[in-house]
Structures are given as C-alpha cells and as structure tokens.
Amino acid sequence: MIKLAKDEKILFIARKHWFVFVKETIVLFFFLCVPLLIIFAFKFLNTKYDIKIHGDVITLFIFLSSIFLLFIWVSIFIVWTDYCLDILIITNIRIVEVEQKGFFSRELSTFRLEHIQDVTAEMNGIIQTFLTFGTIHIQTAGEDREFLMRGVSKPFELKNFISKLYDTVLDKPTIVKISQ
Amino acid sequence: METAFLNGNELQNLITINPQIIWIVFIITLIVFVIISAIIFYHWFAYGYKFKNTLRAIIIYLVGSGFFIIISIVSAIMYTISV
C-alpha cells in the first residue's frame, strides 16, 4: 500500500463511513426496478399496439434482465472499490492521505506529524450527527496546504487521536548533532 | 429485427429477435465484464490493505457475477431453442 520508513509503524487507518457507500449505491438499487418497469411498459404496449415477440418472451426477458443486473452488480463493486481506497493512514511519523478518483486517477499526499498546525473536525446535519461521520481538515505548516477528508467515521475521535500524536511527537527529545 | 408483419387479414406487429443477436450481446457483455473485473482486481491487489479481505471480496464478486452469467447463458440457450 505505502512504503514505510525504518521504525515507522501504522497506528491507525481512517476510512469513510459506510453511509457514504450506501449513499453512492442507492441510485444503483433504484435501477434494480428497471426490469419491472420494462414488463409494465411491454404489457402497456402489447395491449395498445398488439406487439408480439417471436419465441419465448419470458426467457428473452430473463436474458436481458440478467445482463442488466450483472452490470448493476459490477457497478456496486466499482463504487465499493472507490470507497475502500479512500483512506487516511496515520503512522508514528506522518499522515498519508490516499484519494482514489475513479479507476485511473489516484492522489497520494504525505505530511509529517510535526508539520501539523491545526486539526478541525466537523459534522453537519442530522444524518452525520446520528451516524457520527463528517469532515476532517488538517492544516499543515510551510506549504500552507489543507488536507481534507469528507465522510470520515468518528471525526472527533480522529481529531483527538491526531492531536495527541502531534503532542507526543513534539514532546519527544530530538538529538541535534553539532559539527565543528 | 423484423417488424410490421401481415398475418391473415389483420395487421400485427411481430418482432423477431435473431438468436445470433442475443449471443453477440452476451459475448460483448462477457468481454466488457472480463475487462472491468481485471481492472477491479488490479486495484484490490495493488492498493488493498489486507489480503484476507481482498480474497473475500473476490469470492463474493465472482459468485454474484457467476450467478448472473449462468442465468443469461441458460436463458439465451432456451430462447435460441424457442425461436
């Protein structure tokens, strides 16, 4: 997944909340009703225009429905893959943000823990509040960049975890070599 | 696909779907399915975290897909026989 440095350990992997996946697939579940709509449409056309299909209509309908449902099934896994690959990896040295944008676009951002300036967690709305998911913003020093992950599970716990980790990194004594 | 077919004295709309078209649709679907599956599996193996979870996902994916593919094959055969 990512190459770890020497003495580097993965402490936590933050993923998006399951609701984010459900929200993205809900449209696909509505598409499951399409074969039924086709039956109704065909029945309507049949009574109005007396259309007849040569051969076994039911098997033809089953064939087309199974092809359609296969694509819906594959689409669910495409959404799931996208959902699973959006992660925030927190190690004892750095934070790695991985964002998958479709199949052929992947963004990987890394920043060291000591560069963190500000961590903000937010939950907006009833659904986010009840299901405890939201957005986490991590502001870093130097580059003036903000890292953002939407739909992350338990953002306040994650914020506290990162803040504590940041404190331990700052408290750690550093060896400074002075060369003459 | 043939339409507007005269049967006796009344005009009827009889649609005949050639079984060859059914099989062409099936083969195209299968090719697209194999390509998409290869891309999905590549992502799971290249960027996935736990091998056990990846394996479980592959099994669920293939069982579901296999179910629909088998149904489509059986229905295509039955339609071909019925025409």
Image (spheres, coloured by chain):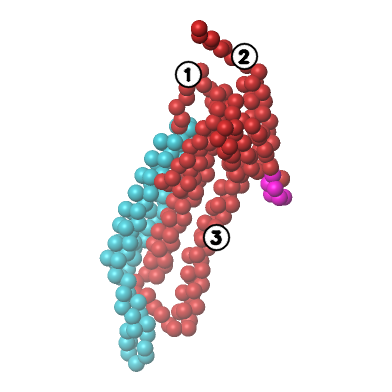
Chain colours: A red, B cyan
Magenta residues, start to end: A123-128
Q: Please name the residue shown 49% across and 49% down the image.
A: A79
Foreground residue among A139 and B37: A139
- Quadrant (top left, top right, bottom left, bottom right) of the C terminus of chain B: bottom left
The residue beneath circle 2 is A173
- Residue A48's disc number: none
Q: Position of residue A93 (x, y in %)?
A: 55, 24
Q: Residue at x 44, y 83 (%)?
A: A49
Q: Residue at x 48, y 81 (%)?
A: A47
Q: Earlier in the sequence, mark 1 or mark 3?
A: 1
> Left or right: A102 with respect to A56?
right
Q: Chain of mark 3?
A: A
Q: Residue furthest left?
A: B20
Tell me the tag on residue A30. 3
| Disc 2 secondary structure class | loop
User: On the rendered structure, is B38 left or right of A41?
Assistant: left
**Front position among marks 1 and 2:** 2
Whole-angstrom CA distance, mark 1 to mark 2, is 18 Å
Instruction: Determine the CA span between mark 1 and mark 3.
Output: 49 Å
Q: Main secondary structure of the magenta part?
A: helix
* Front-lying residue, A40 or A148: A148
Q: Percent x, y for residue B26?
A: 33, 59
Is A99 inside the magenta-drawn segment? no
Residue A73 appears in the picture as rendered: no
Mark 1 vs mark 3: in front = 1
Question: Which of the two labelled residues, at mark 1 and mark 2, occupies the earlier sequence position?
Answer: 1
- Same subunit, tags 1 and 2: yes
* Residue type at numbered disc 3: Phe
Q: Residue furthest bottom?
A: B9
Q: Does residue A3 sit above or below A100 in this rendering?
A: above
Where is A44 relative to A163, above or below? Answer: below
Q: Which residue corresponds to the image point at 51% horizontal and 21% vertical from the top-left?
A: A8
